[in-house]
Image (spheres, rainbow, N blue to C red):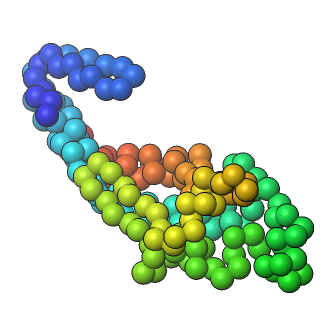
Amino acid sequence: MAKFGKDTRVKFVGGELHIHTTGDDKVYRALGDIIKKTDDLRIPFERFKPVWMDDIADTFAANGTPVPWPDLSPAYAARMHGGDTTPTLRLTDTLYDSLTSQTGDTIWQVGPKTIKFGTRVPYFIFHQEGTATMPQRAPLVLSPYAAQQLVQLIINYISDEAPL
């Protein structure tokens, strides 16, 4: 916990904030309040959940993003899909549903500084990481857009009702 006074230094990853005030206790009290809010980010993390789930739906719709998923092998597509046009990784939609909406297979846990998100669908890991015989088609990727939205939610949370 940072303690603010007339001459304060706060170290962050990648830099340092140096604040020197003369006679305005309100400024360093406000900065202390803002820093304190960063001790528990569960509120913006919960607000992020639908953003991330929508982003994963976009990943499925794009057949992988930012890295496109490899096409199914012709033999596998013929055997499993029987020539229909079911999108990749959507044969039963069990995996898709667990990553894009809240189901019994969805894992979503937030702590003060962490988000744990995933699925209990057992074959997820084979798609996420690939295998010796199956290429990687990672459905769970934090896109630059989703990362930017998470940062914005945190900034909004920290600055909401800031006494400055």
Question: Which residue occupies 60% across, 52% down?
Answer: 129
The N terminus lies in which quarter of the figure?
Answer: top left
Q: Nearer the viewer, residue 52 or 17?
A: 52
Q: Is residue 60 above or below residue 161?
A: below
Question: Which residue occupies 55% across, 60% down?
Answer: 125
Residue 67 image offset from top left, x and y in percent: 72, 48
- Residue 145 seen in render: no
The C terminus lies in which quarter of the figure?
Answer: top left
Residue 161 image offset from top left, x and y in percent: 25, 52
Describe residue 55's horizontal placement relative to residue 65 as left or right.
Answer: left
Spot the residue most to the front.
132
Quarter residue 28 falls in: top left
- Residue 81 seen in render: yes
Quarter residue 22 falls in: top left
Residue 91 image offset from top left, x and y in percent: 71, 79
Quarter residue 97 falls in: bottom right
Residue 127 image offset from top left, x and y in percent: 63, 60
How many numbered markers are drawn?
0
Question: Which residue occupies 46% across, 80% down?
Answer: 103
Q: Is residue 11 above or below residue 130?
A: above
Question: Which residue occupies 23% across, 41% down?
Answer: 34
Q: Is residue 3 above or below residue 6?
A: below
Describe residue 71's horizontal placement relative to residue 154 as left or right.
Answer: right
